Amino acid sequence: MINGILLIDKPAGWTSHDVVKKVKNLLHLKKAGHAGTLDPMATGLLLLCLNQATRHATCLLAADKTYLASLSLGRATDTEDSEGRVIRERPVPLLSLDKIKDVLEGFMGTIEQIPPMYSAIKHQGRPLYQWARAGKTIERLPRPITINQLKLLKYSPNRIDLYIECSKGTYIRSLVVAIAEKLGTVGHLTQLRRMRCGDFVVEKAISIQDLEREVKNGEFDEEKRVIALENKALQTKTAMLA
């Protein structure tokens, strides 16, 4: 029986549940789960906990994460990303690099963030996104999050590319929307890629396509691909996060 952590590079268009279901079927697993949801539009590192390793999922969720994100300025959407409908437009002022960097600096450290309506947080037993789809807005309390790094990678007209290191529970969609507001306009998330979760990095992950090919051709190497429960590094990471 396979027990351990499998690092997957999630493709765009897949839900995290889609990935779990696919891998569970490919590897004939009894149990599988993920440690940290990625939105369908997002790509990058998804930690899959296989069989007995599912008990580590909660600990792994607590790890800090690193993202690459793209913010489109001038249009706001109801989902705060490119999959939603445009609900507001606002001109984009002339922005200098110094102005953008000053705004980003203001989000560093521990800040309060209100979770978006399109999220899996539950209210009266139902995730908020279900209430949102029904046209209802639920009051949400702000939550403390920590932004450890927030760097400007590139600025072009109406687009800002960012490097973000943050604590668990950070909604990147809401973060970039708040950044757009501080810049004097509105905006939404257009691209998101998770690069790191704790000490696990996307460079060590395998794509669904490659995993499927390896399994089909009898080339899947469990020792190479799966971080075993007996792995001392894994035990140390989960112990530190517990």
Image: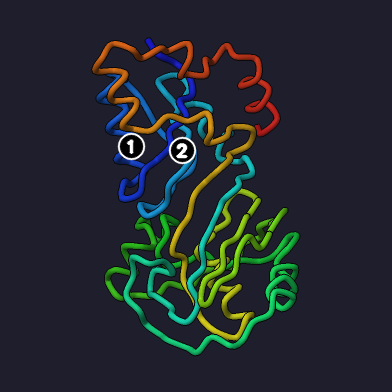
Closer to us: 97 or 168: 97
Closer to us: 87 or 209: 209
Which residue type carries mark 2? Answer: Leu
Q: Look at mark 1 in the image and give the residue it sits on.
A: 19
Disc 1 secondary structure class: helix
Q: Which disc is residue 219 wearing?
A: none
Position of 90 with respect to 230 (left or right) is: left
Q: Quadrant of the C terminus?
A: top right
Residue at x 48% of width, y 72% of height: 72
Q: Look at mark 2 in the image and give the residue it sits on.
A: 46
Which residue type carries mark 1? Answer: Val
* Residue 66 percent coordinates (x, y): 60, 47
* Earlier sequence position, callout 2 versus callout 1: 1
Q: Is residue 159 above or below residue 10?
A: below
Q: Quadrant of the N terminus?
A: top left
| Crowding near the residue tagged with mark 2, few <14, some 14–19, many ≥20 C-alpha atoms within 10 Å | many
Position of 182 with respect to 2 (left or right) is: right
| Crowding near the residue tagged with mark 1, few <14, some 14–19, many ≥20 C-alpha atoms within 10 Å | many
